[in-house]
Amino acid sequence: MNIFITGSAGYVGRLLADSFSKKENVSSIICLDKESIPEILKNNPKVVWINANTSDNDWQEKVKEKSPEVIIHCAWQIRQMYGQEETQKKWNILGTDNVFDFAFENSFVKKLIYFSSAAVYGAREENSIDYFFNEQDPARENDYLYGKEKRISEEHLKEKYSNASHRPQVFVVRPSSLTGPYNNHKVKKFGLQSVLRNVLPVVPIASDNWCRQFIHEDDVIDIISMLSLKELVGDYEILNITPNTLLTGQEIAQVLGKKTVKIPVFLIKIMFFFAWHLTRGAIPTAPGSWKTYSYPIVMDGSKITKKYGYNYQYQSREAFEIDDGRYKMK
C-alpha cells in the first residue's frame, strides 16, 4: 500500500509518516510539504519527499506515479499571517480543494482523511462546560479565521463528494488539542501549550467555564492508522477525536504548578487586539482567537469508540501531564 500525506513537515504529518514507514504492509509514503524534510524522516527508504505547496499544480503528476490508495490531508497554514489573508486563503482553501479534487479524480484512491478541527464548532459565550458537541451539531465558526477556513473546507468536501462519480471512503477528523512528548520537546511552535508551560509565570483565566481537551499524539497516530489500514463501515464519516474528559483552567494551572489570574473577557479582547497589531502577528493573537481563550469548546469523542471500537489510551489530564509515549525523549 502507498499512502500520500500532505503537510508532512508539520507535527502530525511527520509522526504519521514515520509511523506508517514502520508497517510492513505500507510500501511507500509520499510526503508533500512546502517546507524541507524534517530530521525524523531523512534517509527513510520508504519516504518519497515532494517539496510543493498544495495550492500549486506541480505535484499531482508526481503523486500519480505512486498511485496512493490512501490520502491524509494535514497541510494547513494554522498560524494566521498578518496582512496576508488572500495568500492564506489560497494556501488553505484552494490547496485543500486541490487535494480533494485529486482524490475524487483518481480511481486508485480508496480513502481520504481530512484533518479538520474542534474550532469549527465555534467558541461562544453561550457554550457550556457541561455540553459536549457531537458530530451532528452544526459547524458555525465565522470569526476566527482558522476555524472558519476549516469549516469552509469541510463544506467544500461534502459538496465535491456529493457531485463525484468516484467516491473514496471519507473520514473527517476533528481533534482536540494535540499533545505528547514530541510536541513538548521537538515542535517549535509558539502556541497555547508552549506559552502556558514555558512563558507565562501564571495561568490567565477569563471565566470559570474556560477549559481544554487534550488528545495524545499516540492516540492520533493509532486512530489514523486504523482509519487508513482497516476495513471499516461507513462511506462519509465525521469523527470528533478526543477523550470525553477535560481540564479546567484551574486544573491546567495545578498540573503546571502555577497560580491562576482572573482576567475579564473584555480585557483579553483588548490585549489580543493590541498584541496582534503592534507585533504585526508575531504574537499569535489573530482576530477572533480571543474567544478560544475565553469560552469552552467541549466535544463528545465517543463515536469512534461506539462505531469502530477504538479506546483512547490517554485521558485529557494524562495526555497533558505525563511526558510519556512512543516519542518520549531518551
Image (tube, grey):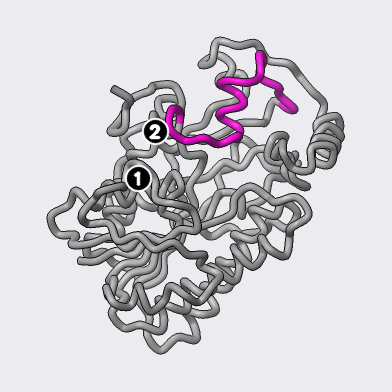
Look at 37% across and 85% down and name the residue there.
Answer: 166
Residue 96 horizontal/vertical position (percent): 53, 68
Residue 25 left/right relative to 143:
left
Q: Which residues are magenta?
A: 184-207
Binning the other alpha carbons within 10 Å of mark 2 as few (below 14), some (14 to 19) or many (20 upward) gives many
Q: Are marks 1 and 2 in contact (CB under 8 Å)?
A: yes
Binning the other alpha carbons within 10 Å of mark 1 as few (below 14), some (14 to 19) or many (20 upward) gives many
Residue found at the far left of this picture: 24
Kind of residue sitting beneath label 2: Tyr
Q: Nearer the viewer, residue 208 or 29?
A: 29
Q: Nearer the viewer, residue 3 or 203?
A: 3
Residue 171 horizontal/vertical position (percent): 40, 63
Q: Is residue 267 magenta?
A: no
Residue 170 left/right relative to 89:
left
Q: Which residue is mark 1?
A: 15
The answer to whether residue 179 of the structure is visible from this angle is: yes
Residue 144 left/right relative to 190:
right
Residue 147 horizontal/vertical position (percent): 64, 54
Look at 49% across and 86% down and name the residue there.
Answer: 163
Quarter of the rendering occupied by the N terminus: bottom left
Residue found at the far bottom of this picture: 165
Image quarter for residue 45?
Answer: bottom left
Q: Mark 2 or mark 1, which is nearer the start of the sequence?
A: 1
Look at 28% across and 22% down and name the residue there.
Answer: 330
Q: Is residue 185 magenta?
A: yes
Image quarter for residue 90?
Answer: bottom right
Q: Which residue is mark 2?
A: 182
Vertical side of 267 occupied by 119: above or below: below
What element does badge 1 sit on? Answer: helix
Residue 109 left/right relative to 163:
left
Q: Nearer the viewer, residue 32 or 299?
A: 32
